[in-house]
Amino acid sequence: MLSTTGIIVFILLLAVAGYFCVMGLAKLYNRVRIGRPIDRSDRLMERIMGFFGRQDCQRKIAREPAAALMHLPILYGVILFILGAVHLALEKLIGLVIFGSPYFYLITEIGGILLLFGMLYSAWRRYVQKIPRLDTGTWEEERFIVFLISDLCLIVVAFFLSYGFKLIASPEYFDQWRLSMAPASLLVASLFNGVEPAMAGKLELVFWWVHILAAFTLIGIPRYSPLLHPAAAPLNIIFRYMDSKIEPMEKIDFEDEERETFGVNKLSDFTWKDLLDCYACAECGRCQDNCPAYLTDKPLSPKKLLAHIKEHLEEIVPGEPRIKMVDGHMVFDQQEQKSEDAEDAKKLLGEVIDEHAIWACTTCRACREQCPNMNEHANKIMQLRRAYVLDESDFPAEAQLTFTNMERNSNPWGIGWADRANWAADLDVKILGEAEDAESVEYLFYVGCAGSFDDRIKKVSTALVKVLKEAGVSFGIL
Ligand code: SF4
Ligand code: SF4
């Protein structure tokens, strides 16, 4: 067990790490909260259980076996190792042993080995194989990734060294079968078995403190790191859109005379969930690698789109609350925050996000399909487009003809609006609004513009009508 001084130092260090962690999470909260409200508080239990139960995220990662070989050991290694490391810290501090089974030590060390393997393999993929989609493109983020990989490796290695030397210093510890199944610690003990027990005892303590310092550094890192994916991704999945696979675009109320803008042109036009998406992003590049615009050398990368929004958010909202005393109570002061929010007026269009990127999107949503964190890119792009079209009246010349056609004839082809049902002239289809027995029709076949005017798609409409008739379905068109 630790001395009283050791316990006091431990508690002080834990308090400092906890403070930095809370400050980091407060920054995340303050930045995300500048977004517009959107209600995602319904079915909370279902959301949380869905998060723990859903395998989509891991399945998406496993589409590339090499990525799964890196990510799964990290995920499950962290869970197993943290449980064991906390347990062993309690034992060191207050002599509390909850699980005395050798299997517990075996599981802890397997967790540590998995984590170490995952981290080293991740470094290999990033810096030796140099997989292009993993490149963050900024030195600031890259140095944090190097730091995180090194720190996690140090936590695990120092842990193994500490318990390895403990075996040499206190053979009776081994005899109590407490570490008899801990493979890594046993390996360390056999490698250093010439070390005197007294020296081994000191080394055990040194490496235990190294392990603790590295762990506390990791706890406090959110205060400084721009990479808050581990904190934001679970929240992002919990607060996901749940009613269908694709989140619908927000409807515009054109009757609302108070409304001055219709699209998104500054950060606070996004919802808080849109902004959380940017922090949940692990910059894995799966969206980018499956984006038809990116793959055909258009200036759009869905990954970079989120990264640019996040960078802009960090630039204008420093986010860290000041703590001050009011009437003897400690309160977070948000005043500074409000004045900084005013700078949010800086436009996203053109200044933060390349105009050509916005128009390059095909809205195929392959990015959403591939993203393990359920980020929604296409809706953000559509909302930026809305700002171009509805707020700025600024759009590519190619779109001009389409808009004029829609305005004059209610279809992008510009064919006379009265000819909408011509394709069905010989098919004996009821036209609702014209047919006398329209009330008795059970289903509406909503044909849309392409099905009514495009020569190829008209064949699809015709075929569907034949199928419906053959099946005896009561239906009509508009
Ligand atoms: S929806 Fe847009 S950004 Fe996403 S993959 Fe398709 S083209 Fe790329
Ligand atoms: S948005 Fe999703 S798929 Fe794209 S880089 Fe981020 S985490 Fe990966």
Image (tube, helix red, strand yellow):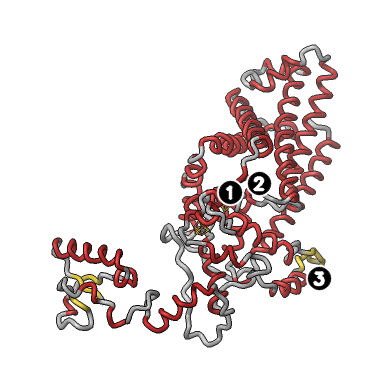
Q: How many marks?
A: 3
The secondary structure type at the circle numbered 3 is: loop
The residue lying at 75 percent from left, 45 percent from top is: 143
Give the distance between the C-alpha atoms of the residues marked 3 and 2, in whole angstroms: 49 Å
How crowded pointer 2 is (Cα within 10 Å; few <14, some 14-19, many 20+) is rated as: some
The secondary structure type at the circle numbered 1 is: loop
Q: Nearer the viewer, mark 1 or mark 3?
A: 1
**Residue 99 position (above or below residue 226):** above
Q: Quadrant of residue 86?
A: top right
Is the residue under label 2 in contact with that under label 3 (CB below 8 Å)? no
Q: Is mark 2 within 8 Å of ligand 2?
A: no
* Residue that numbered label 1 is attached to: 285
Residue 18 in view in this figure: no
Q: Amino acid at mark 2?
A: Asp
Residue 367 vs residue 80: left or right? left
Q: Amino acid at mark 1?
A: Gly
The secondary structure type at the circle numbered 2 is: loop
* Residue that numbered label 3 is attached to: 327
Task: Name the spot of residue 410 as percent of width and height, x first.
Answer: 37, 80
* Residue that numbered label 2 is attached to: 135
Q: Quadrant of the C terminus?
A: bottom left
How crowded pointer 3 is (Cα within 10 Å; few <14, some 14-19, many 20+) is rated as: few
Give the distance between the C-alpha atoms of the residues marked 1 and 3, in whole angstroms: 50 Å
Does label 1 or label 2 sit earlier along the sequence? 2
Residue 282 vs residue 165: left or right? left
Does label 1 or label 3 sit earlier along the sequence? 1
Give the distance between the C-alpha atoms of the residues marked 1 and 2, in whole angstroms: 8 Å
